[in-house]
């Protein structure tokens, strides 16, 4: 018996912890093309912005592999998987046998066609090596163009602002973070960016990256030219299915898994950003590329690789993002839809905005700007799909908490406390 | 395989019927997390940065109750934490945040079903939560100092990391 995990980020760590909860002895090997101890991918922006050191990027303590009795093969790329012989071919020619395999290869950048992509000083914003390269050019007083004003693009913007880099961010959509924010919320966030001298160009795209060998500017669709010293591409992330794409495993947008994280191939599991997952609010399989989902999928896969019977089928999108100290938290759906009741509270003088999406007296989504305390109570309402008729009028009230719950609901909640 | 592992997990619960809303739990939580753990006056007068209370009191007269981390068996905050700062002790089940590794992204606040993780801006912007007073030997200051026994510690038996129905009550 042996377990092999390809990937070394959140889903892989979840899997290791899931495996070792039930099986302390079967050999586990972790293979990753990155040479690093497991680190937190979202921390790359905090590293670039100077808030965390390289040492503090670690997602688990340095004795993590040793304590869990894990063999690591880091900095070695997996090239292909032979399902019939149950082996993984590594780039050094070695064939690694497995009894159970987990594919946790994460995401990869999505880059739409544009001219001049072959120049120097054009970076992605996903991995440690991306920011190690960016920090060399992102010096005080330099000029950057960030393409994409979603979550990761704006975290790049934030980091660059902290490095005193002058930033222009460009997005094809009509507002920033279009999938999370509505117009009102996006205006609050845009104001924060403006306060930090960030230029935001919307409804626009980059036609061509200008410059000789090195990027020196961009030419936009509307004819505008912007000079810059470097460019960060943060347009989107796709499931990184490269390793198995022609292997016969079932892939939709990501690797298709069931609620036990099993793929269409026996003894092969997938978890994290490379896999799809069941979004129980949307009631469909889709990518849920967020840390909590990656962890739970990994943990579920790990438990089941040991012969367990764990299921994970209540994933949904949730995000917390402080943008230059403006806290933004959202969960569930985040767009107006037919049949979905909306309750919103906007206080322009305080820059606070709260919006709740309700379907059939159940909370299916929310968005909080600035006043985000106790947000998890709302997340839990989504998770549990409990009837919130009695709470509707107090949603978003100042000091909202269990005190607003009817006594029986509150007592059950508080007395149960902590049970999984 | 250690499928039959049984451990006891402690939880702090509140009885709203006897809570008088005096907020002494908050005061003693502040003291317990200050550098003057045994001196309430110094804790309030001399602490350069008076810590946040990690218990919160909800109150709409006549109802009030204290609420703090449940140290969940399936701690959503730990699994959602993007840095790995939020961790659960596998033996005691106590969930603590390593503030030196916390970056204040508030993902734990997004995830916590009880809304008991606070944003602490006193230092370098971190998440602040109940640590079961492990520095005081695990005897929580809020419980010890509640004048009307509205807070109590209950012991819950946990089988193979899944909660069993059985309770080994030590209700005070």
Image (cartoon, coloured by chain):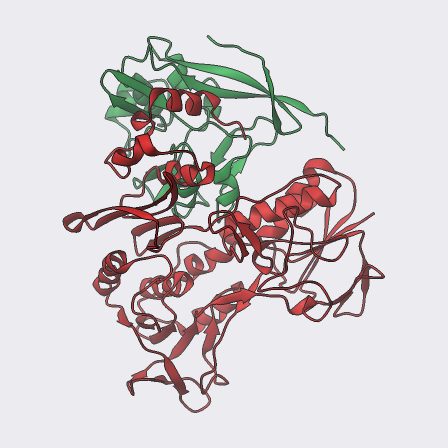
Chain colours: A red, B green
From this view, report whether residue A221 is shown above or below residue A304.
Answer: below
* Closer-to-camera residue (B31/A420): A420
Name the side, left or right, on which A6 lies relative to B92: right
In the foreground, A165 or B166 = B166
Q: Quadrant of residue B13?
A: top left
- The location of residue B113, given as percent across then percent down, is 43, 34
Relative to residue A122, is residue B47 depicted above or below? above
Q: Quadrant of residue A313?
A: top right
At x 76%, y 33%, the residue is B1
Locate residue A161 relative to residue A230 in the image: left or right.
left
**Can residue B51 be seen by looking at this rendering?**
no
Q: Position of residue A302 (x, y in %)?
A: 68, 45
Q: Is residue B90 left or right of residue A174?
A: right
Residue sitting at the far right: A85
Residue A357 in sight: yes
Give x and y (percent) for residue A350: 17, 48
Total marks shown come to 0
Question: In this rendering, would A291 be left or right of A156?
Answer: right
**Hey, which residue is sitting farthest bottom in the picture?**
A212
Q: Which residue is depicted at the point 29% across and 58% down?
A: A182
Q: Which of the image's four quarters has the C terminus of chain A?
A: top right
Identify the image quadrant of residue A19.
Answer: top right
């Amino acid at each position: 018996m042996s377990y092999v995990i390809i990937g070394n980020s959140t889903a892989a760590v979840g899997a290791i912890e899931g495996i070792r909860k039930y099986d302390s002895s079967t050999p586990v090997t972790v293979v990753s093309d990155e040479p690093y101890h497991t680190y937190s991918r979202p921390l790359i922006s905090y590293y670039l912005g100077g808030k965390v050191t390289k040492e503090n990027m670690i997602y688990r303590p340095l004795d993590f592999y040793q304590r869990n009795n894990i063999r690591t093969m880091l900095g070695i790329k997996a090239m292909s998987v032979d399902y019939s012989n149950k082996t993984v071919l590594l780039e050094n020619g070695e064939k690694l046998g497995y009894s159970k395999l987990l594919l946790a290869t994460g995401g990869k950048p999505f880059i739409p066609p544009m001219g001049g992509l072959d120049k120097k000083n054009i970076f992605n914003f996903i991995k440690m090596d991306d920011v190690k390269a960016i920090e060399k050019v992102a010096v005080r007083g330099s000029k950057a163009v960030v393409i994409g004003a979603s979550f990761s693009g704006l975290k790049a913007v934030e980091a660059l602002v902290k490095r005193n880099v002058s930033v222009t961010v460009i997005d094809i959509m009509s507002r920033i973070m279009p999938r999370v924010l509505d117009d009102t919320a996006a205006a609050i966030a845009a104001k924060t960016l403006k306060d930090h001298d960030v230029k935001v160009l919307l409804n626009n795209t980059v036609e061509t990256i200008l410059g000789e060998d090195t990027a020196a500017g961009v030419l936009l669709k509307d004819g505008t030219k912007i000079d810059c010293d470097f460019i960060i591409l943060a347009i989107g992330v796709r499931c990184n299915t490269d390793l198995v794409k022609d292997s016969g495993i079932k892939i939709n947008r990501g690797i298709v898994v069931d609620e036990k994280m099993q793929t269409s191939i026996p003894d092969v599991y997938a978890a994290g950003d490379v896999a799809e997952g069941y979004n129980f609010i949307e009631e469909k399989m889709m990518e849920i590329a967020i840390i909590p989902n990656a962890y739970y999928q990994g943990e579920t896969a790990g438990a089941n690789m040991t012969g367990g019977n764990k299921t994970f089928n209540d994933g949904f999108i949730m995000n917390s993002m402080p943008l230059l100290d403006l806290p933004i938290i959202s969960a569930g759906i985040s767009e107006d839809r037919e049949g979905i009741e909306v309750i919103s509270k906007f206080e322009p003088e305080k820059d606070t905005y709260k919006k709740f999406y309700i379907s059939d007296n159940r909370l299916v989504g929310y968005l909080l700007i600035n006043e985000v305390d106790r947000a998890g109570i709302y997340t839990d309402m989504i998770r549990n799909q409990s009837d919130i008729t009695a709470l509707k009028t107090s949603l978003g009230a100042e000091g909202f908490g269990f005190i607003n719950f009817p006594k029986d609901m509150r007592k059950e909640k508080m007395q149960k406390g902590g049970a999984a | 395989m250690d499928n039959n592992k049984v451990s006891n997990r402690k939880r702090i619960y509140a009885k709203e019927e006897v809570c008088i809303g005096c907020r002494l739990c908050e005061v003693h939580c502040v003291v317990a997390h200050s550098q003057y753990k045994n001196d309430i006056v110094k804790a309030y007068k001399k602490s350069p940065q008076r810590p946040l209370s990690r218990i919160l009191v909800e109150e709409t007269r006549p109802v009030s109750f204290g609420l703090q981390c449940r140290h969940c068996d399936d701690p959503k905050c730990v699994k959602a934490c993007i840095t790995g700062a939020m961790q659960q002790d596998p033996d005691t089940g106590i969930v603590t945040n390593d503030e030196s590794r916390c970056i204040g992204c508030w993902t734990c606040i997004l995830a916590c079903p009880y809304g008991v993780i606070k944003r602490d801006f006193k230092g370098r912007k971190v998440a602040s939560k109940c640590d079961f007073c492990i520095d005081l030997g695990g005897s929580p200051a809020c419980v010890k100092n509640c004048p009307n026994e509205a807070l109590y510690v209950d012991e819950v038996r946990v089988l193979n990391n899944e909660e069993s129905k059985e309770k080994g009550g030590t209700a005070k």
